[in-house]
Image (cartoon, rainbow, N blue to C red):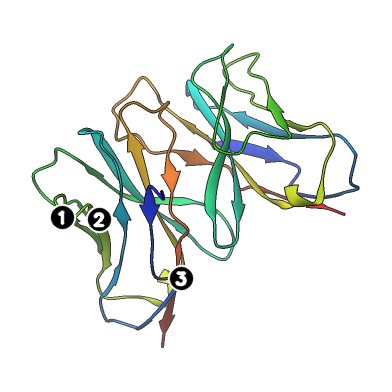
Amino acid sequence: AQKITQTQPGMFVQEKEAVTLDCTYDTSDPSYGLFWYKQPSSGEMIFLIYQGSYDQQNATEGRYSLNFQKARKSANLVISASQLGDSAMYFCAMRESGSARQLTFGSGTQLTVLP
Amino acid sequence: IAGITQAPTSQILAAGRRMTLRCTQDMRHNAMYWYRQDLGLGLRLIHYSNTAGTTGKGEVPDGYSVSRANTDDFPLTLASAVPSQTSVYFCASSDSAGHPNSPLHFGNGTRLTVT
């Protein structure tokens, strides 16, 4: 079974609007962390935001926020006020406490911001 | 500038040839990883190393080997390349002694084509 599922291969959003990128995960580990990365067309992997399984509040980093619904095992990324530079591939990833600290990645969502 | 350096940036390789992808980090991170990125599959872990002198297998280790003689270097070797190993390869590191929320830091990737 997939540990990280991103069901939106591609998304479009109008500039200045908000967009939500979906991520669901599967784990029986009570302690885990969820990460989002951005990969622009240049190819580098850029860390955006982190959410811990025991965190009481949803994580926020500037225009990025994480809609964490633990019971539903979802960790959706919300980008507010989209910019053209937000066009990129976005990956959700999970680290379980029992793992060798590696991240397990989803298949990604390609976001295109329209002018 | 501190970070991860991968070499080469890209390579075309004949099937059956041996190839080593190089990865060096200067952040003194204990843990290092090799991922491959394929369209529609996200990033998949090939091998990892929690500390110098130790290595482990990831999700897709067949056809690859690694070594970790020191903290800084983590080369990935394809003993006899096959076309299915055509991919973009990312080296990453993390501070395993730090908090569980420590993200992976990635190199810029090596694009490998096996013909």
What whole-number distance in Å separates the C-alpha atoms at marks 1 and 2?
6 Å
Relative side of B34 to A64, left or right: right
Depth order, front residue of B91/B25:
B91
Relative side of A105 to A70, left or right: right
Tell me whether the residue at label 1 lies in contact with that at label 3, contact meaning CB atoms closer than 8 angstroms. no
Tell me whether the residue at label 2 lies in contact with that at label 3, contact meaning CB atoms closer than 8 angstroms. no
Residue ID at (54%, 45%): B44
Q: Secondary structure at mark 3?
A: loop
Amino acid at circle 3: Pro
Amino acid at circle 2: Ala
- Which chain is disc 2 placed on? A
Residue under numbered circle 1? A69
Q: Residues within 10 Å of mark 1 (few under 14, many from 20)?
A: few
Vertical placement of residue A71 versus A23, above or below: above
Screen quadrant of the N terminus of chain B: top right
Residue under numbered circle 3? A9
Amino acid at circle 1: Gln
Q: Residues within 10 Å of mark 3 (few under 14, many from 20)?
A: some
Residue under numbered circle 2? A75
Tell me whether the residue at label 1 lies in contact with that at label 2, contact meaning CB atoms closer than 8 angstroms. yes
Residue A18 location, x and y as percent?
25, 76
Vertical placement of residue B109 versus B101, above or below: below
Residue ID at (26%, 61%): A76
Q: Secondary structure at mark 1?
A: strand
Seen as rendered, the residue at the extreme left is A56
Residue ID at (86%, 34%): B18
Residue B110 location, x and y as percent?
69, 47
